Image (cartoon, rainbow, N blue to C red):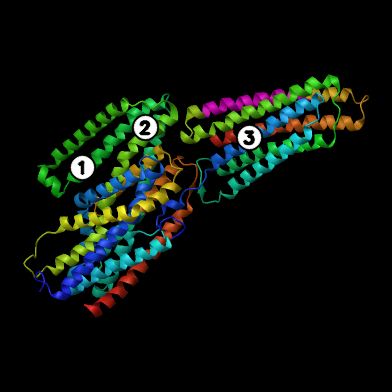
């Protein structure tokens, strides 16, 4: 006897996975959400000049990134070729990869900003704050897309659920576009200041704007993979 | 002389009865759990309810629907006229049942997903082969049975696929899924009763007693469909189930109680013969030269098998159900309902066609069917490979075991 379970010769027991890959995806998304929300708050404070607790936030983001990595690894190592999913497994894995990239970029950004406390010029402050809010909004819209996966799976991808998801995906695209516009403005303003500021400051300001924006890009990629995932 | 039999013959009959009961117990202890696990896993019924439903309905299925498969195992695989000597026939069928029993016990211990049905067919073929040669085997029927082993999981898959797709189409895709479920669910319950009714009475002893012709049976079956569907719509129409997909699952959780009964009934119908058919041949042959010759013990033997299965469920099967149920939590009720319906319909139809099939493998087919209908979050198809291996392994193993046991028995008796 194996532990306390009875001996069986049942073929049924081997057919299911202990945990659904979609449950794993949602758990991973929880980490992403927590991480971007911490990052958003930390960046806003940073832009306003409050860098007191930034190192703690950066550390927390790193921890979340690591926890999410474990979830991702667990999902992927439990998807051998014999597993049949209701969606294209390749798309699913790409989606997961892009979702994980959000965390990687959040971590890189937080670490970079923790390494060098670049002073944000007063006239750029509001632009930076607006930008990070738009990036966080993009992730929040993407979260709606991912959260709908539960209903999609339950209803076996009926049209009305797919249409709902598509409308969320459009919102992600809109927010990402808005974030892009803000980044162009930022870049323009930063270049205008190239005579006034030390080159290293310019470099860092550009880098912060770029890396923040990368998060929105990856959120958009997640939405695009979801679009492919639900395509008939 | 005991009951007009030689003492050795009597002893042989007793051994056959014990092994037959042991086989029935085995079916109850293991195979039933496999088919009930979807309902237990989906929390449609509690473990206690599952045991009760399985015991009662397996018993009823065995008595009222078990005779077609029993007939196939008795007369369809080996042509006993070619063997001639009644003593050889008795020893042979005893050997086949012992071979199957031993094989199944080892398989259970080793947790191999083999089928009781395949084991007993292997056992019968084995002894038939060495006592009567290749001519004694009815190859046509054996081929039919073997092909039904491939066809039955496929049929289970197709039916479960269609049931699930229609739930998606008529319920999930509708604007108010909970309202649609209330209308659509009972239709399937009506269909369940229709199939059960028509199987119970078409060309059966019971049907001959109660009805005068097939037209009458068909008419009554349609009446049963309409009445049960309307009654179902009426009953669930009054249920407060809430809204959305959760409400749909809640409703199907209730409906799955019916389909799990359907599974248990069909299971009894198909599997009782695995234990009882060889025993029946032994008993009938032993009584040939006694005052009891010619009497029909079929129903008593089927009832004995039903009791054996019920005992297996109650003494051991519940443990297996609990183990499996805890592993199958991923299955929601709409999915469980589809799997149950696909399995039970396939097994019941096969039973009435006299085809001994594996219920467990049909369940697997049905689950894969729902998976192919995009109803499951993840299905591990490597189980198919395991089942194919079990086919390839069970038959030769049971054949060889049966031959060895027959040789041994010929020395003793």
Viewer-proximal residue among B298 and A34? A34
Residue visible at 71% across and 37% down in the picture: A61
Q: Position of residue A205 (x, y in %)?
A: 84, 29
- Secondary structure that dominates the magenta span: helix
Q: Is residue B315 above or below residue B125?
A: above
Q: Nearer the viewer, mark 2 or mark 3?
A: 2
- Residue B161: quarter of image: top left
> Dots 2 and 3: beta carbons under 8 Å?
no
Residue B60 appearing in the image: yes
Which residues make up the magenta segment?
A162-183
The label number, if any, that marks residue A222 in the structure image: 3
Residue, disc 1? B198
Residue, disc 2? B251
Q: How far apart in space, not on screen, are marks 1 and 3 (Cα)?
A: 53 Å
What is the secondary structure assignment of the residue under circle 2?
helix
Residue visible at 59% across and 44% down in the picture: A90
Residue visible at 58% across and 35% down in the picture: A228
Residue visible at 31% across and 75% down in the picture: B404
Q: How far apart in space, not on screen, are marks 2 and 3 (Cα)?
A: 35 Å
Q: Is residue B130 above or below residue A24?
A: below
* Image position of B391 (left or right of B13): right
* Label 1 Cα crowd, 10 Å radius (few <14 / some 14-19 / many 20+): some
Which chain is disc 1 placed on?
B
Viewer-proximal residue among B297 and B385? B297
Q: Quadrant of the N terminus of chain A?
A: bottom left
- Residue B373: quarter of image: top left
Q: Position of residue B55 (x, y in %)?
A: 27, 49
Asked if the magenta segment contains residue A173, the reply would be: yes
* Label 3 Cα crowd, 10 Å radius (few <14 / some 14-19 / many 20+): many
* Image position of A87 (left or right of B148): right
């Amino acid at each position: 006897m194996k532990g306390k379970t009875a001996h069986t010769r049942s073929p049924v027991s081997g057919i299911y996975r202990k945990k659904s890959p979609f449950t794993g995806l949602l758990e991973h998304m929880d980490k992403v959400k927590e991480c971007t929300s911490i990052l958003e708050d930390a960046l806003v404070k940073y832009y306003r000049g409050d860098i007191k607790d930034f190192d703690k936030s950066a550390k927390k983001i790193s921890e979340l990134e690591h926890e999410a990595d474990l979830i991702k690894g667990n999902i992927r190592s439990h998807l051998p070729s014999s597993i049949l999913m209701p969606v294209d497994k390749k798309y699913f894995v790409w989606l997961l990869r892009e979702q994980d990239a959000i965390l990687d970029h959040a971590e890189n950004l937080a670490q970079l900003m923790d390494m060098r406390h670049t002073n944000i010029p007063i006239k750029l402050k509001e632009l930076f704050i607006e930008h990070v809010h738009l990036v966080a909004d993009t992730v929040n819209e993407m979260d709606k897309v991912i959260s709908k996966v539960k209903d999609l799976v339950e209803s076996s991808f009926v049209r009305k659920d797919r249409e709902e998801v598509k409308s969320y995906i459009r919102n992600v695209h809109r927010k990402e576009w808005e974030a892009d516009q803000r980044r162009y403005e930022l870049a323009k303003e930063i270049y205008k200041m190239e005579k006034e500021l030390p080159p290293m400051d310019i470099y860092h300001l550009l880098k912060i704007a770029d890396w923040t924006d990368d998060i929105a890009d990856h959120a958009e990629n997640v939405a695009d993979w979801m679009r492919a995932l639900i395509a008939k | 002389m005991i009951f007009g039999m030689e003492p050795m013959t009597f002893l042989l009959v007793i051994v056959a009865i014990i092994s037959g009961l042991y086989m029935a117990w085995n079916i109850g202890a293991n195979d039933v759990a496999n088919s009930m696990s979807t309902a237990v896993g989906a929390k449609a019924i509690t473990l206690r309810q599952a045991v009760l439903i399985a015991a009662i309905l397996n018993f009823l299925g065995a008595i009222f629907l078990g005779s077609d498969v029993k007939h196939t195992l008795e007369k369809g695989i080996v042509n006993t006229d070619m063997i001639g000597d009644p003593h050889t026939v008795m020893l042979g069928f005893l050997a086949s049942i012992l071979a199957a029993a031993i094989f199944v016990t080892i398989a259970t211990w080793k947790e191999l997903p083999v089928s009781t049905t395949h084991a007993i067919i292997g056992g019968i073929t084995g002894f038939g082969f060495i006592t009567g040669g290749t001519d004694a085997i009815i190859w046509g029927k054996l081929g039919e049975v073997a092909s039904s082993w491939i066809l039955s999981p496929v049929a289970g898959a197709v039916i479960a696929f269609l049931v699930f797709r229609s739930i998606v189409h008529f319920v999930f895709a509708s604007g108010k899924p909970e309202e649609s479920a209330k209308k659509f669910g009972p239709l399937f319950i009506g269909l369940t009763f229709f199939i059960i009714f028509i199987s119970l009475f078409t060309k059966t002893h019971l049907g001959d007693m109660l009805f005068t012709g097939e037209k009458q049976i068909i008419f009554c079956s349609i009446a049963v469909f309409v009445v049960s569907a309307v009654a179902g719509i009426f009953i669930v129409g009054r249920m407060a189930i809430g809204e959305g997909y959760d409400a749909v699952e809640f409703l199907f959780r209730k409906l799955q109680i019916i389909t799990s009964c359907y599974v248990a009934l069909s299971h009894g119908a198909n599997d009782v013969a695995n234990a009882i058919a060889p025993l029946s041949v032994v008993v009938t042959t032993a009584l040939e030269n006694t005052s009891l010759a010619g009497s029909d013990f079929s129903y008593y033997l089927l009832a004995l098998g039903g009791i054996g299965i019920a005992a297996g469920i109650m003494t051991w099967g519940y443990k297996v159900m609990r183990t499996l149920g805890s592993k199958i939590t991923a299955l929601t009720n709409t999915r469980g309902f589809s799997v149950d319906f696909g399995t039970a319909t396939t097994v019941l139809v096969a039973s009435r066609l006299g085809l001994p099939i594996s219920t467990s493998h049909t369940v697997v087919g049905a689950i894969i069917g729902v998976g192919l209908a995009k109803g499951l979050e993840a299905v591990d198809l490597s189980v198919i490979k395991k089942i194919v291996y079990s086919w390839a392994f069970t038959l030769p193993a049971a054949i060889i075991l049966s031959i060895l046991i027959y040789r041994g028995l010929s020395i003793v008796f």
